[in-house]
Amino acid sequence: MTEQNPSQKTPAVLFVCSKNGGKSQLAAGLMNQLAGGDVTVYSAGTKPCSSLNPQAVESLTELGIDITGEHPKPVTDDVLDSVDAVIVLGTEAKLEAPAGKRFEVWETDEPSERGIEGMERMRLVRDDIKARVQKLHAELTGK
């Protein structure tokens, strides 16, 4: 195990979607599993819904990731101020790029446009997000 340089702070990322019930929760769960604590992870929604998407939760459970304790949360200035990167998933969420922060919009795969629904759709969305999260993790941590 390599020791981190104490002068290097842990990078922090905020994943945002409109409802914070699906895509941003998927990204946060995947990053938390991959990073194992070497990235601080937040998720939020521009218009948070009342509960998590059960298929999103189930698709992560299939990978051994448990997000049942999570709940949709709004984007706050405190979180925006504390992160290094803001990632917006999908095109529904509208968020101004915060000054001085890495800001990306991930136009994620939308299998429903191809007539794919249910868990098959959710797995495709999850796997698209997983590949992007792996690349982001490597960029944030240099690993």
Image (spheres, grey):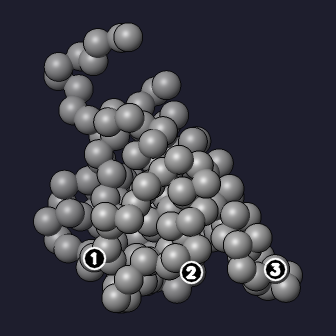
Name the residue: 33% across, 51% down: 41
Name the residue: 34% across, 40% down: 39
Badge 2 local density, few (<14 within 10 Å), some, or many (20+)? few
Q: Is residue 16 above or below residue 60?
A: below
Q: Is residue 5 above or below residue 40?
A: above
Residue nearest the viewer, comparing 49 with 91 = 49
Q: Secondary structure at mark 2?
A: loop
Of the two numbered discs 3 and 2 on the same chain, state the one appearing first in sequence: 2
- Circles 3 and 1 in contact, beta carbons < 8 Å: no
Three-letter amino acid code of the residue under disc 2: Thr
Three-letter amino acid code of the residue under disc 1: Lys
Left/right of residue 112 with respect to residue 18 in the rendered view:
right
Residue nearest the viewer, comparing 48 with 4 = 48
Instruction: Estimate the spatial distance between the alpha carbons at disc 3 and disc 1, rounded to whole Å.
Output: 28 Å
Residue under pointer 3: 116
Q: Nearer the viewer, mark 2 or mark 1?
A: 1
Which image quarter: residue 109?
A: bottom right
Which image quarter: residue 50?
A: bottom left
Q: Is residue 15 above or below residue 110?
A: above
- Which percent across, then down, holds residue 34? 48, 39
* Residue 45 visible in image: no
Residue under pointer 1: 73
Badge 1 local density, few (<14 within 10 Å), some, or many (20+)? many
Residue under pointer 2: 91
Q: Secondary structure at mark 3?
A: loop
Name the residue: 17% across, 19% down: 6
- Which percent across, then down, holds residue 108? 65, 68
